[in-house]
């Protein structure tokens, strides 16, 4: 049994003039449907696997806060304009909390790590997310991880290390702290999102837009004050920001949040391991890198970890015998 929420998500309390909105838990999918949901959710971390090469090859150097703000705020405002829906009741603060965890704090930490660490080191640190989700799940979702989940988590970390680490990798303490903090925040956001659910009648795009806008509004003034704008934006810069904002953020996170809603938290967290796989393939195709025998072993371990980490308790619940 994987980590699943034992709580029904709670809706907004609402104001005196507006009734409370209850979040409706998604029905448990069948094994076939779950595989499709997982495949779509994996698009999120798969696109995030291209963040490192996009940052280093297309974006202006040494502006992690600006990169984070331009990735989050425009995408959030576009989704708000498309959905025309604002939070109500306690979803104002819930969306703000999730926006900080997923974007306002997470994005600058990830970009800082991308600027200060080799991609292999950053990916290996982020691979501990399934173990962190399992740990947070005990306190937030009141569900203990199984031995199978823990084994899969350690196998995933070992596989990612073999896949992406290099003997010549330069270790930057500040970068390591940033990546570990970012991974911890995202893991906590996963279990918190699982517990809170989604308010009734609100689309996933609207929920994604709320969080992106909240995170972006926090990031924008800090980025402009601390870093400012470059003298000019090149065509490559614009392409990089557009790709990260539209594909790597608005689309990717909508699919990721859909996975959080419909899959067990632990199962979803293992899909994040597709990130270093794609990052390695991107380096292979775009940067002329090659794969060693040990990297192939690591790739096999990562794929085994993802499969092992998927829950087997899909399908309708069987009624308990009296």
Image (cartoon, rainbow, N blue to C red):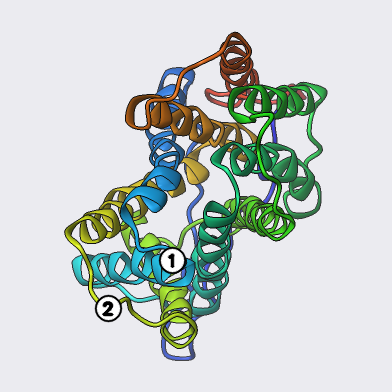
Q: Residue furthest bottom?
A: 16
Look at the image and tell me in which quarter the N terminus lies: top right
Q: Choose between 287 and 89: the one closer to the eye.
A: 287
Q: Secondary structure at mark 1?
A: helix
152 versus 131 height, above or below = above
Look at the image and tell me in which quarter the C terminus lies: top right
- Residue 127 seen in render: yes
Camera-side mark, 1 or 2: 2
Mark 1 burial class by Cα count in 10 Å: few <14, some 14-19, many 20+: many
Q: Position of residue 7 (x, y in %)?
A: 67, 51
Q: Position of residue 122 (x, y in %)?
A: 61, 44
Mark 2 burial class by Cα count in 10 Å: few <14, some 14-19, many 20+: few
Q: Residue at x 35, y 48 (%)?
A: 57
- Mark 1 and mark 2 lie on one chain; the one further toward the N terminus is 1
43 versus 101 height, above or below = above
Q: Residue at x 32, y 76 (%)?
A: 230
CA–CA distance in space, label 1 to label 2: 18 Å
**Image quadrant of residue 301?**
top right
178 versus 270 height, above or below = below
Question: Which residue corresponds to mark 1?
Answer: 68
Question: Which residue corresponds to mark 2?
Answer: 231
Q: Position of residue 3 (x, y in %)?
A: 70, 37
Q: Residue furthest front?
A: 168
Q: Residue at x 65, y 38 (%)?
A: 169
- Label 1 close to label 2 by CB (< 8 Å): no
**Image quadrant of residue 94?**
bottom right
Label of residue 16 in the image: none
Q: Residue at x 23, y 67 (%)?
A: 78
Q: Secondary structure at mark 2?
A: loop
- Residue 254 seen in render: no
Q: Is 148 situated left or right of 275 in this image? A: right
């Amino acid at each position: 049994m994987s980590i699943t929420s034992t709580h029904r998500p709670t809706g907004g309390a609402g104001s005196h003039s507006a009734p409370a909105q209850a979040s409706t838990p998604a029905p448990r999918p069948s094994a076939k449907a779950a595989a499709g949901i997982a495949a779509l959710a994996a698009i999120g971390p798969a696109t995030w696997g291209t963040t490192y090469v996009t940052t280093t090859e297309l974006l202006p150097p040494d502006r992690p806060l600006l990169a984070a703000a331009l990735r989050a705020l425009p995408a959030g405002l576009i989704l708000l304009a498309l959905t025309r829906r604002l939070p109500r009741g306690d979803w104002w603060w819930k969306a703000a909390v999730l926006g900080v965890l997923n974007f306002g704090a997470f994005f600058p930490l990830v970009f800082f790590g991308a600027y200060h660490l080799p991609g292999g080191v950053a990916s290996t640190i982020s691979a501990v997310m399934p173990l962190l989700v399992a740990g947070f799940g005990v306190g937030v979702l009141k569900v203990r991880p199984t031995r199978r989940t823990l084994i899969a988590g350690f196998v995933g970390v070992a596989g990612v290390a073999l896949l992406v680490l290099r003997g010549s990798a330069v270790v930057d303490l500040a970068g390591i702290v940033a990546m570990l903090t970012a991974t911890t925040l995202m893991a906590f956001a996963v279990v918190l999102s699982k517990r809170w659910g989604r308010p009734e009648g609100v689309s996933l795009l609207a929920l994604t837009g709320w969080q992106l806008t909240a995170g972006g509004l926090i990031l924008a003034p800090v980025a402009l004050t601390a870093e400012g704008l470059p003298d000019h934006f090149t065509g490559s810069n614009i392409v990089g920001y557009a790709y990260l904002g539209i594909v790597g953020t608005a689309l990717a996170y909508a699919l990721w949040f859909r996975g959080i809603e419909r899959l067990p938290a632990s199962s979803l967290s293992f899909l994040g391991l597709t990130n270093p796989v794609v990052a390695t393939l991107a380096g292979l195709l775009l940067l002329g890198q090659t794969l060693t025998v040990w990297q192939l072993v690591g790739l096999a371990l990562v794929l085994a970890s993802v499969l092992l980490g998927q829950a087997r308790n899909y399908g309708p619940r069987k009624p308990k015998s009296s």
